[in-house]
Amino acid sequence: MDEKHLAKADFITSIFLILFSLLIMIYTVFKFPRFPEWGGIYSNPGFVPFLLGLTLFLMSSYLLTRSLRRQGHLVRISREGLGLFFRSTVVVRIFICFGLFILYYLLLGRIPFMINTALYLFLSIIIFGQGKWYIALIISAATSLAVYLIFIRVFLVPLP
């Protein structure tokens, strides 16, 4: 990708990330519970997500200013350009990732955690990897078991 196209991509990406970070910050301020008896704002459950949203906002703002300096705001959107965009390999892979994530989320709690995680990892490796299916199965099962055991035995955190 040349410098001109990169500036336009940075401009569009920064706008989406700024909106997303604002959504995160607004949600954590208005929707997360507050517990004054815990000792103030720093111990409330929305504090860390707010800081992450603020960090994302600051980094996205920097990306926006950098793209504006490189004339990234001169974006022309056309029907054929959008078609090429949505058919590009990168965008198709992003939609596949979102689809796998939504499938994982919908199955969470309906089937055991280890099976759900192993299925998610297996599908991700098969779709995006170049390996053989039985190696993907071994890796996904071992990783799922390791995560489960670490959270249950070491961190003492129950998983769904």
Image: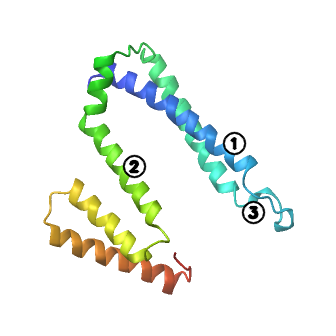
Comes first in the chain, label 1 or label 3: 1
Within-10-Å neighbours for mark 2: few <14, some 14–19, many 20+: few
Q: Residue furthest right?
A: 37
Measure the alpha-carbon separation of dots 1 and 3: 18 Å
Q: Nearer the viewer, mark 1 or mark 2?
A: 2
Rendered image quadrant of residue 139: bottom left
Quarter of the figure that contains the N terminus: top left
At horizontal 34% and vertical 15% (from top left) the residue drawn is 78
Q: Amino acid at mark 1?
A: Ile
Which sits in the foreground, 39 or 108?
108
Q: Position of residue 107 (x, y in %)?
A: 44, 66
**Which residue carries the number 3 mark?**
43
At horizontal 55% and vertical 42% (from top left) the residue drawn is 56
Within-10-Å neighbours for mark 1: few <14, some 14–19, many 20+: some
Whether residue 69 is situated above or below residue 49 in the rendered picture: above
**Which residue carries the number 2 mark?**
98
At horizontal 26% and vertical 32% (from top left) the residue drawn is 87
Confirm whether residue 4 shows in the render. Answer: yes
At horizontal 15% and vertical 57% (from top left) the residue drawn is 130
Q: Position of residue 69 (x, y in %)?
A: 47, 17
Measure the alpha-carbon separation of dots 1 and 2: 23 Å
Q: Amino acid at mark 3?
A: Ser
Element at label 1: helix
Which sits in the foreground, 21 or 54?
21
Q: Position of residue 22 (x, y in %)?
A: 63, 38
**Which residue carries the number 1 mark?**
26
